Image (spheres, rainbow, N blue to C red):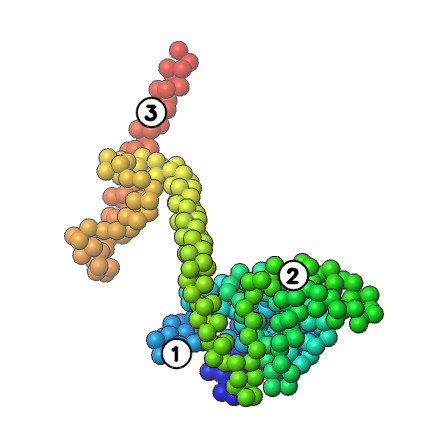
Amino acid sequence: MLAPILDIRDTVKYKEVMKQYGLGPNGGIVTSLNLFATRFDQVMKFIEKRQNASKYVIIDTPGQIEVFTWSASGTIITEALASSFPSVVVYVMDTSRSTNPITFMSNMLYACSILYKTKLPFIVVMNKTDIIDHSFAVEWMQDFETFQDALNQETSYVSNLTRSMSLVLDEFYSSLKVVGVSAVLGTGLDDFFVQLSKAVEEYEREYRPEYERLRKTLENAQSKQKRDQLERLRKDMGPVCMQGNTIAGSDDASAMGPSELILTRGNLDEDEEERESDTDDIDHEVTEESHEEPAFKNFMQETRMRYQRRSNENE
């Protein structure tokens, strides 16, 4: 078996996370995955660089359903991959441990929940066919009566629930891609890659347009949010702009909106920039007086105008 090129254990120390945050095994795994998700953009960049040299990228995720499938970090990772690359979910089950109909139904419910959570092309790979052939499981999925006969041999109360669930999953079975393989002998891999190619075509045909639509919707929402923020900023800066225009007494400044005022505030003409570049030659007293004089005149003019308005109102 080939060693992984990228290993989460090289980034996050699982046992250290458990000690630091006082977590149990599952809590430590979830927290480690959350920490890793914050750097997943680096993984995306790595995949982009290698996409011309590598035909397939295999990402092995935690098997616990609460750790990856139904966690926030798992959703972030899945959607990041699916929005950029043709992505297929491969659910690997142990055929030798699924000969019991109740255990088999538990596996199928697990697979169904992953399919509807990820909303991606889905393949069920029944591994260890070198121990037992997977034909019995395929027959159970295709023939309801055969599965019921196997359940009749079970006497536990769970068998009644399993019998009811088998009817619910009948539609799920009809569109499910199932492949039997042996990782030891390599049998069934050719069939698996055929199904994988079909799943990629399904992604391009049905899933990619949906992700493109979601991406455009997100971009439009972000663009609208930026426009709303600018509009609020323009309204908030309006009174400041009016006050600045009154003090400066400049006709050009009154024509500028708040955004232009922000962008141009502090910008100097070339001549002024050259004069102020040598700070040793600045006469600060003269500079302050040159700003105070027009400001004082404007203040006096405004005071007289307010006084005249009040006098007119009293009359």
State the separation of the CA atoms marked 1 and 2.
Answer: 36 Å
Between circles 1 and 2, the one closer to the viewer is 2
Q: Position of residue 66 (x, y in %)?
A: 64, 67
Residue 42 visible? The answer is no
Q: Foreground residue, 9 or 70?
A: 70
Q: Position of residue 63 (x, y in %)?
A: 62, 74
Quadrant of the frame with the C terminus: top left
Q: Identify the mark nearer the N-term, 3 or 2.
A: 2
Which mark is drawn over residue 304?
A: 3
Q: Residue at point 35% right, 19% down?
A: 308
Residue at the spot of label 1 = 54
Label 2 element class = loop
The quadrant where residue 261 appears: top left
State the separation of the CA atoms marked 3 and 2.
Answer: 85 Å
The quadrant where residue 123 appears: bottom right
Amino acid of disc 2 = Leu
Residue 60 visible? The answer is yes
54 w.r.t. 233: above or below: below
Q: Foreground residue, 108 or 292?
A: 108
